[in-house]
Image (cartoon, helix red, strand yellow):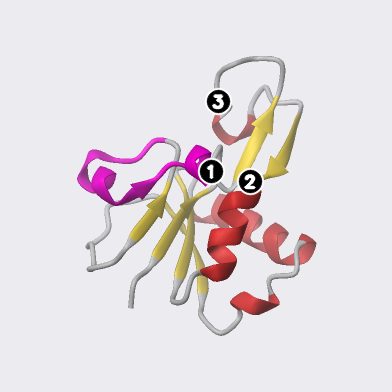
């Protein structure tokens, strides 16, 4: 079954400030908002989903908790949603990655958040 990997910063959420550059882990940002196109994809995905971040597993788990506490994600409960730190993974056929800065190894499988 295809897995959906969703990066957090500037993918699942958008950091907002007066500066044109992305804000790693929110440093320097004034506020954040959900990236609704990514949320829609996450809700529609059939299969396991992984919320991950270069900020590590604890950071990813914090955002996963926030996701379920602030939004109605009940339609996602049939399939597991995990949190993990960003690390190389063994690709499976059909895997999808939503990331604003993909690794070269899976760039061909990536959807950029701005395309959603």
Q: Above or below — where is 83 with respect to 24?
A: below
> How many residues crowd mark 2 within 10 Å: few (<14), some (14–19), many (20+)?
some
Question: Mark on residue 11?
Answer: 1
The residue where tag 2 is placed is: 35
- In this view, the residue farthest toward the bottom is 78
Q: Quadrant of residue 107?
A: top left
Sequence-wise first label, 1 or 3: 1
In the rendered structure, does residue 102 fall within the stretch colored magenta? yes
> How many residues crowd mark 3 within 10 Å: few (<14), some (14–19), many (20+)?
some
Question: Mark on residue 22?
Answer: 3
Secondary element at image label 1: loop
Residue 5 location (% of width, % of height) = 42, 58
Residue ID at (34%, 40%): 102
Residue ID at (69%, 77%): 74
Decide which of 38, 77 is in the foreground and name it: 38
> How many residues crowd mark 1 within 10 Å: few (<14), some (14–19), many (20+)?
many
Residue 22 location (% of width, % of height) = 55, 25
Q: Above or below — where is 43 with respect to 20?
A: below
Magenta stretch in the rendered image: 101-116
- Asked whether the residues under the numbered discs 2 and 3 touch, taking CB atoms below 8 Å apart as contact, a structural biologist would say no
């Amino acid at each position: 079954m295809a897995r959906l990997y969703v990066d957090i910063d500037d993918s699942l959420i958008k950091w907002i400030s007066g500066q044109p550059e992305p804000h790693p882990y929110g440093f320097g940002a004034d506020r954040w908002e959900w990236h609704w196109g990514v949320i829609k994809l996450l809700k529609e995905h059939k299969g396991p989903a992984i919320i991950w971040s270069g900020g590590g597993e604890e950071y990813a788990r914090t955002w996963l908790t926030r996701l379920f506490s602030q939004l109605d994600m009940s339609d996602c409960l049939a399939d597991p949603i995990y949190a993990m730190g960003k690390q190389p993974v063994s690709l499976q056929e059909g895997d999808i990655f939503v990331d604003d800065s993909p690794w070269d190894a899976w760039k061909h499988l990536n959807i950029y958040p701005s395309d959603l």
